[in-house]
Image (cartoon, grey):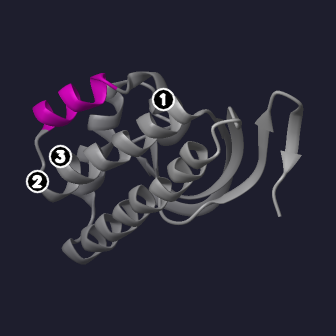
Amino acid sequence: MRAREYAAKLTVNLDQLRKIERAQREVYDKGLVKPSDTKLLTALGAVASVLGLVFVASTPAGVVAGVTGIVASITPSAKDALESMVKAGYWELGYMEDYLVDNPRINRMEIELPFIEYNVNGETIRFITGKGIILRVHNGSGWIPVD
């Protein structure tokens, strides 16, 4: 198993951001804290349209397999660290959601997020690990840089 950390850009609207946030939370709850492949598979079905954006694996079954492979391959202390990072990523996405909700004229935003990516048995999966940066936002007039 290999792991690496990096930042990557995503362009999302409010609906996509909410689904990404939910997917990350479901992985935390049902994949790491109280693992249940069946419950995680069902939960990810509701947000399947965004799985490839955040996890690289683009199907609920692919995400479940990736999470299961990681959990089986890492030490308890590494699992605790991963849980903490995944929770931080989920939590920080809420602030980006708030930004879009508070600014209804903005219909999309380009964000840069921190990720940890694992390669387990030839399969790749990644998780958002913390606070991202809003790079620019889009409204009816075009893209606007955010300072």
Of the residues shown, which amino acid type is indicated by label 1? Val
In the image, which residues are magenta?
37-46
- The spot of residue 89 in percent (x, y) is 44, 60
The one nearer the camera, 89 or 124, is 89
Using the rendered image of the protein, determine whether residue 123 is visible from the camera's viewpoint.
Answer: no
Which amino acid, by three-letter code, is at mark 2? Lys
Which quarter of the rendering shows the C terminus?
bottom right
Q: CA distance from mark 2 to mark 1?
A: 23 Å
Within 10 angstroms of label 1, few (less than 14), some, or many (20 or more) residues? many
Q: Secondary structure at mark 1?
A: helix
Marking on residue 30: 3
Residue that badge 2 annotates: 34
Queried whether the magenta region covers residue 12, the answer comes back as: no
User: Residue 22: horizontal and vertical position, in percent?
Assistant: 35, 41
Q: Name the secondary structure under disc 3.
A: helix
Q: Disc 3 vs disc 2: Cβ atoms closer than 8 Å? A: yes
Q: Which residue is mark 1?
A: 50
Out of 87 and 38, give the one closest to the viewer. 87
